[in-house]
Image (cartoon, rainbow, N blue to C red):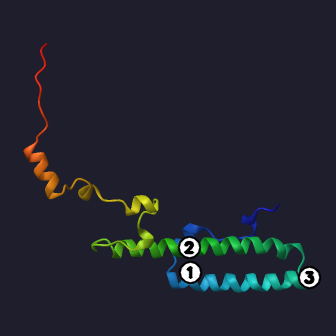
Amino acid sequence: RRNPGSMGRIKAHELREKKTSDLLTQLDGFRNELSQLRVSKVSGQGGPSKLSKIRMIRKSIARVLTVYNEKRRNALKKASLKKKYIPLDLRKKQTRAIRQSLSLHWKSKKTAKQEKKDAYFPMRKYALKA
């Protein structure tokens, strides 16, 4: 298998310097190129060089999308910093049971009846002989 770096692949750190609009135009370009390569693959023209380029273009699309989503999430994080609620896709995933369980504050709460019982019947203290 050939080294994909020899064909001039794009690097993530270069993409991070670009604006989101530039990323989206580059993404459209890659998608168009990929569709053309797939057409040439089906029609049987182009040979092995075009087949190996399909893989490189797919990886480039993934890289652009990754950087784009990183930028979008970072912007959302900055925007929701001072707000009361965090957007759902930025919250911790965890498990459904953990997410729906009571918070520590509500777990430690007692009913009025339980408060009275605790007040009227405190824990007994015993003095042990040494």
Q: Is residue 72 left or right of residue 130?
A: right
| The N terminus: image quadrant | bottom right
Instruction: State which tag comes first along the sequence, 1 or 2.
Output: 2
Q: Which residue is mark 1?
A: 23
Q: Is residue 127 left or right of residue 81?
A: left
Instruction: State which tag comes first along the sequence, 1 or 3.
Output: 1
Q: Residue visible at 52% across and 85% down?
A: 21
What whole-number distance in Å separates the C-alpha atoms at marks 2 and 3? 33 Å
In depth, the one of 104 and 55 nearer the eye is: 104
The correct choice, above or below, for 107 with respect to 73 in the image is: above
Q: Is residue 30 left or right of residue 1?
A: left
Indicate the amino acid at tag 3: Gly
The correct choice, above or below, for 30 with respect to 89 in the image is: below
In depth, the one of 58 and 23 nearer the eye is: 58
Find numbered disc 3 in the image and state the secondary structure of the residue it sits on: loop
Q: Are marks 1 and 3 in contact (CB under 8 Å)?
A: no
What whole-number distance in Å separates the C-alpha atoms at marks 1 and 2? 7 Å
Indicate the amino acid at tag 1: Leu
Q: Residue visible at 8% across and 47% down?
A: 119
Residue reaching furthest left?
Answer: 120
Please name which of the two marks, 1 or 3, marks the residue nearer to the observer.
3
Please name which of the two marks, 2 or 3, marks the residue nearer to the observer.
3
Q: Are marks 1 and 2 in contact (CB under 8 Å)?
A: yes
Q: Which residue is mark 2?
A: 15
Quarter of the rendering containing residue 91: bottom left
What whole-number distance in Å separates the C-alpha atoms at marks 1 and 3? 31 Å
The correct choice, above or below, for 129 with respect to 42 in the image is: above
| Percent of width and height locating residue 24 | 57, 84
Q: Residues within 10 Å of mark 1 (few under 14, many from 20)?
A: some
